[in-house]
Amino acid sequence: MIYKITGEFPENEKFGLTSQLRRAAISIPSNLAEGAGRKSTKEFIQFLYIALGSSSEIETQLEIAARLGYFDNPSDGLNLLIDIRKLILGLIRSLKKKV
């Protein structure tokens, strides 16, 4: 979704918001994968928190892009972020019970 949204941004944002949003979007699944590959549950949880941080970055950057008029309906992206956060937080809660 982020790649689709940023594909419509102005060319002058290629190295600004477009780049930042895409990196943050890739960071979420990357940190989930890296954390899952770690030896301990505690390490996995740390990477899940990093993924949550990336979701907060995306929220802020989507808000900025919407205020700049780069796209019309920020609620679609924000609703997806809320769902992603709920899933990550649920996984964190579940893993913390094991630690």
Image (cartoon, helix red, strand yellow):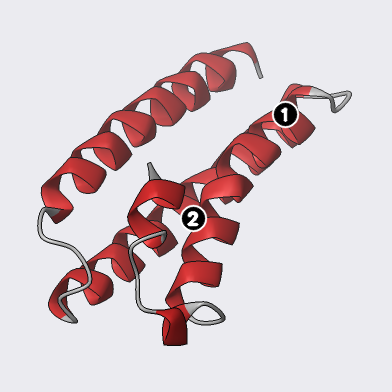
**76 or 91, which is in the foreground?**
76
Instruction: Locate the N terminus by quadrant.
Output: top left
Dot placed on the residue nearer the N-terminal end, 1 or 2: 1
**15 or 93, which is in the foreground?**
15
Callout 2: helix, strand or loop? Answer: helix
Q: Which residue is mark 2?
A: 53
The relative height of residue 39 versus residue 97 in the rendered view (above or below) is below
Residue depicted at 61% across the width and 35% down the height:
29
Callout 1: helix, strand or loop? Answer: helix
Tally of numbered tags: 2
Q: Amino acid at mark 1?
A: Ala
Q: Nearer the viewer, mark 1 or mark 2?
A: 1
Whole-Å distance between the Cαs marked 1 and 2? Answer: 15 Å
Residue depicted at 58% across the width and 18% down the height:
95
Residue depicted at 15% across the width and 76% down the height:
69
Q: Which residue is mark 1?
A: 33
Q: Amino acid at mark 2?
A: Gly
**73 or 98, which is in the foreground?**
73
Residue depicted at 47% across the width and 69% down the height:
18
Name the spot of residue 73 as percent of width and height, x first.
Answer: 11, 53
The relative height of residue 32 versus residue 87 in the rendered view (above or below) is below
